[in-house]
Amino acid sequence: MNSIRKFMRNYPMVASAVIFPFVFIFIYTMLSLFIEIFLPIILSIWITGFIYNLITQDPNDSMRNNIYWTTKYYK
């Protein structure tokens, strides 16, 4: 392990070039997972709550901007 550490300290550009592809694949996978799966789910839940509130709320209701719409209506 010390020989690897010594090599990495002596040649930081080579060590970075070896590490970079693994980090890039990991980050690319996590980002694509977030953009393709989690972001649409989060936006769908938010837009569903917004549309539900538009349809069901009284215009004179003081709880118009209730961010906890799921707990209020689905308990």
Image (spheres, rainbow, N blue to C red):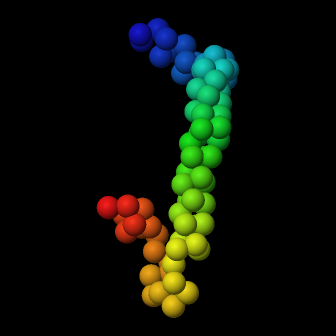
Residue 23 is at least partly visible in this image: no
Q: Residue at x 65, y 30 (%)?
A: 28
x and y, in percent, of residue 63 in the image: 44, 82
Q: Toward which corner of the image does residue 25 lie, by quadrant?
A: top right
Judge by depth and name the residue closer to the eye, 55 or 34.
Answer: 55
Residue 56 is at least partly visible in this image: yes
Q: Toward which corner of the image does residue 59 lie, by quadrant?
A: bottom right
x and y, in percent, of residue 3 in the image: 47, 8
x and y, in percent, of residue 30 in the image: 58, 33
Is the N terminus in the top left, top right, bottom left or bottom right quadrant?
Answer: top left
Q: Residue at x 60, y 54 (%)?
A: 43
As displayed, is residue 36 above or below residue 59?
above
Judge by depth and name the residue closer to the eye, 42 or 62.
Answer: 62
x and y, in percent, of residue 67 in the image: 46, 69
Judge by depth and name the residue closer to the eye, 39 or 7.
Answer: 39
As displayed, is residue 65 above or below residue 6?
below
Q: Residue at x 42, y 12 (%)?
A: 2
Judge by depth and name the residue closer to the eye, 44 or 8.
Answer: 44
Q: Residue furthest bottom?
A: 60
As displayed, is residue 41 above or below residue 30?
below
